[in-house]
Image (cartoon, helix red, strand yellow):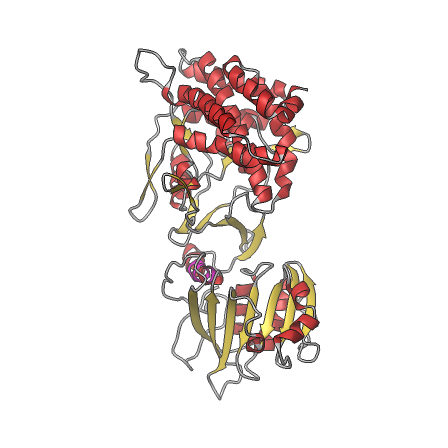
Amino acid sequence: MAFDDTPDGAAAATTINSLLSPPAPALLRADNPRAEATWEFPIDNEAGTEALAHLLAEELRPGDLVTLSGDLGAGKTTFARALIRILADDPDLEVPSPTFTLMQLYETVHGTVVHADLYRVGSAAELEDLGWDEASEEAIVLVEWPERAAGVLAADRLDVALTHVNSDNYEARRVRLTGTGHFAPRLARLQSLRRLLEKAGWGEARREHIYGDASVRLYDRLHKPTGETAILMIAPPRLAGPAIRNGRPYHELAKLADRVDAFVAVAQGLREQGFSAPEIYGADLDQGLVLVEDLGQEPVVNADGPIPERYREAVGVLAALHDKDLPSVLPVMDGREHVLQPYDLEALLIEVELLLDWYAPHQGGGSLGAAARSDFLKIWTELLGQVVNGPQTDIPQTNIPQTWTLRDMHSPNLFWLPERKGLARVGLIDLQDTVLGHPAYDVAALLQDARVTVPAALELELIAHYAKLRRARHPDFDVAGFAEAYAILGAQRITKLFGTFVRLDKRDGKPQYLAHLPRLQDYLARNLAHPVLSELKLWYEARLPGLVAQTSA
């Protein structure tokens, strides 16, 4: 959907392809409660009103507040009716004006929608009598005459102001959208999104919200009338969290990407190497919008778990990737470059500390003492130092293997592309946190999948397959050294995930991740069986006995 800015009173097109092409909006921070973004344009008939309703319906989510402003007869109820019918996916839905009932509730495919008309409300106290708080919680809320409830409605909102502009055309309106608080950057991104989609040839596509991941990124599947699809990733620049060490937030210490530049660079880099990462159709890097190829929905697992043939090909992808001489600086676009950071001791250690900060209190009801924490970090520093720097000998280590480490090489991020050949049948997504690290990390991420159980026998078979592929190209490939690094990095990753999944529950309200903890315990037991982890195993047995008791069963 596009719009075209014109002076007040000028004729405006009303098709989905021609409502507005605004100037580039400034990048706004989502944590600024005083932020404000505006977008103004004309519409000249009912088709324009419906086009506007379609535009906003694709953006709205439960919890959003939309206020409707304008004089009597400005078209607030007409717009609300069009929006509700689109949200309900029912063009014939009866949507009466709530002037006398004050509030109407609708159950739609997008969740509950509350339509309120506050013209007859005398005070904010009357809203409480109506059960406003309960009705509006986790709903998309549309409010006409919001000024009647000043001080009660949330400051984070989208205001739609409608104004008559042409006495000869009763349907002509000037629309002014104003996003305030958290809605300001969303409105700015929506403007950028419309330009991006139009430029890439996807302006007429329908947006379908799809499941996101454990991060704050959002994903939509776009559907063209022709049947073509694409994926829209919405990943605004990461806001810096609180400083936790040396004045730096967690994401910097853990070497996590803070911009979509990383995803674009790595996806393009993998495609240049012959792997099936998504093609980039277009991007607005500053707004965090990336339009990419849809790799489909055929997974590498089924109801019984991993599909061995597909996992075998995924292992082949890693072996082929790890055989390549790969650059550490990748082009993005518009003259930008992305530098891959090392998955160094600092990053690996800050990740395992999540177990101490989140999982240990969750399991035992309290924090571990300073001595236990010190011993834990000492053990991990020695173990991870072997992986990052090589064994401590008098001979300098110059051949420590490093490669692109995707970090999220597991079943949710892999798709099967049967129409392609060989290793290209494995589609790869979720690439933004790629770093330079040891090749064993991604093999462990794949074969110790937190979301699906990989049987121990299959894990061993595929490790052997990986080693065979590497030795076919490099007869001196160190199988024993790889197995040791696999155990260390596998245990590091599982330890991190114990803390991560509890944090997702406690901090982010996502308890579903706790269901994976028993699987993590089994994987941890497999890793702790390696002799190199004997001291770490003793620490777990002494400090987190409930965890080890289950893994040892």
At a point 60% along the width and 59% down the height, the residue shown is 62
Instruction: Note whether 321 is above or below 24 in the view shown.
Output: above
Instruction: Residue 530: say if magenta.
Output: no
Instruction: Note whether 412 is above or below 185 in the view shown.
Output: above
Is residue 328 toward the left or the right of residue 465 in the image? left
Residue sitting nearer the eye, 19 or 503: 503
Instruction: Note whether 545 is above or below 75 in the view shown.
Output: above
Residue sitting nearer the eye, 537 or 334: 537
Is residue 480 toward the left or the right of residue 93 in the image? left
Magenta stretch secondary structure, dominant: helix
Q: From this viewpoint, which residue is outermost toward the bottom?
A: 167
- The C terminus - image quarter: top right
Residue 400 appears anywhere in the view: yes
Residue 265, percent from left and from top: 38, 41
At a point 53% along the width and 49% down the height, the residue shown is 219
Which quadrant holds residue 272? top left
Q: What stretch is highlighted in magenta?
A: 186-193
Residue 319 appears anywhere in the view: no
Residue 46, percent from left and from top: 56, 76
Residue sitting nearer the eye, 106 or 168: 106
Residue 197, percent from left and from top: 45, 57
Residue 70, percent from left and from top: 52, 80
Q: From this viewpoint, which residue is outermost toward the left?
A: 335
Instruction: Note whether 29 is above or below 15 in the view shown.
Output: above
